[in-house]
Image (tube, rainbow, N blue to C red):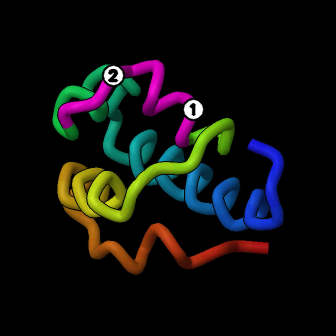
Amino acid sequence: MKNKHFDIWLGIGLNILHYRKEQGLTQIQLAERCGISRTYMQKIETAVTSCTLDTLIDIADALKIPLVKLFEFRD
């Protein structure tokens, strides 16, 4: 995904990866909880593609974290 918001999507993807790993989940497990494919989850985590807000809400719910945590970017 090469667009003007790439850095934001990369930050979101890294946050998803962080919380997923923190909880000991695989991409497959998280994807299943969200009702999406593992491939799509991988593309979201690596910012290859963007996703809908609904999907981000599903991911946050599956990770049992507030949605805002996906938007807290680290330096």
Above or below — where is 66 with respect to 5? Answer: below
What type is the residue that disc 1 sits on? Lys
Q: Which residue position is annotated with label 2?
A: 37
Residue sitting at x 29%, y 34%:
30
Magenta stretch bounds: 35-44
Residue sitting at x 74%, y 65%:
5
Q: How many marks?
A: 2
Residue 18 % position (x, y): 52, 50
Q: Was residue 40 drawn as part of the magenta stretch in this picture? A: yes
Secondary structure, mark 1, is helix
Q: Is residue 61 left or right of residue 15?
A: left
Residue 17 % position (x, y): 52, 44
Q: Was residue 68 drawn as part of the magenta stretch in this picture? A: no
Above or below — where is 50 with respect to 12? Answer: above
Quadrant for the C terminus, please.
Answer: bottom right
Residue 16 % position (x, y): 47, 51
Q: Residues within 10 Å of mark 1 (few under 14, many from 20)?
A: some
Quadrant for the N terminus, please.
Answer: top right
The rendered magenta stretch, by its main secondary structure, is classed as: helix
What type is the residue that disc 2 sits on? Ser
Q: In this view of the protein, which residue sits in the foreground, 66 or 55?
A: 55
Residue sitting at x 53%, y 41%:
44
Residue sitting at x 56%, y 49%:
50
Label 1 to label 2, Cα distance in Å? 10 Å
Q: In terms of sequence position, does the residue under pointer 1 or pointer 2 come before the other?
A: 2
Q: Which residue position is annotated with label 1?
A: 43
